[in-house]
Image (cartoon, rainbow, N blue to C red):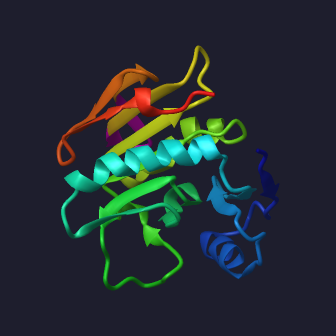
Amino acid sequence: MSALTVSQDPDQNWDDLVRYWEEMEWPEGSKVEIIEGIITVSPSPAHRHNVIAGRIQRRLYPVIPEEWEIFQTQSIAVPARLGMLVPDLLVMPVQEHLETDSYVPAALAELVVEVTSRSNARHDRVSKAAAYATAGIPLYLLTDCWAPGGPTATLYGEPKGDVYRVLSAVKFGDPIKLPAPFDVTIDTGEFPVD
């Protein structure tokens, strides 16, 4: 899987980036994000990627409040980092009234989950982690299929500025526990590795 970046004028402001992101016709089925001010177009994820996201989602549904939802294609805005991101899973309270249907403020999220692909691993590890921390999202679960030394799952929390604290890190095969309000253990042994 590879990603295409669309160059932008470095003096372009947030509103211009969002307008371009909203108005451009992107390839159907692609994931279009603004990462650090650069529009990135990625193909739909591979099967293994979707299986991992699906298994995490299955574990989260029984433990979230009724007024929360889990989204797979919801864009979240982090203007301070010039980011319009689409996490693989987004857990947040359902919003009845928003300014736009295109995206929601990232600060509404309670948890974001990213599953790395070979082409986007750096974004998930560095750029998106910084953006999610900047937005104050309490928990970020990174399932890194391409980590040096083998696949890992890392739970980040306690955001301060653009940095998270590592709350837990495990190799695939070991369980990882998400704290309150989730209080759920995810068995990474259920994740495909090949």
Residue at 54% from the left image edge and 55% from the top image edge: 81
The reply to whether residue 98 is in sight is yes
The reply to whether residue 128 is in sight is no
Residue at 39% from the left image edge and 23% from the top image edge: 169
State the extent of the magenta-drawn residues as a range: 158-166
Residue at 33% from the left image edge and 44% from the top image edge: 139
- Mark count: 0
Residue 23 picture location, percent across and down: 71, 82
**Dominant secondary structure of the residues highlighted in magenta in the image:** strand
Which residue is more in the foreground, 1 or 62? 62
Residue 81 against residue 180 in the figure, above or below: below
Q: Name the image quarter holding the N terminus.
A: top right
Residue 19 picture location, percent across and down: 66, 79
Q: Is residue 148 magenta?
A: no
Q: Is residue 164 magenta?
A: yes
Residue 61 picture location, percent across and down: 29, 55
Q: Would residue 157 appear left or right of 134 to someone viewing this image?
A: left
Residue 126 picture location, percent across and down: 56, 37
Q: Would residue 110 appear left or right of 118 to someone viewing this image?
A: left
Q: Would residue 139 appear left or right of 2 to someone viewing this image?
A: left
Hey, which quadrant is residue 33 in on the image? bottom right
Residue at 18% from the left image edge and 41% from the top image edge: 183
Residue 89 against residue 69 in the figure, above or below: above
Which residue is more in the foreground, 64 or 83? 64
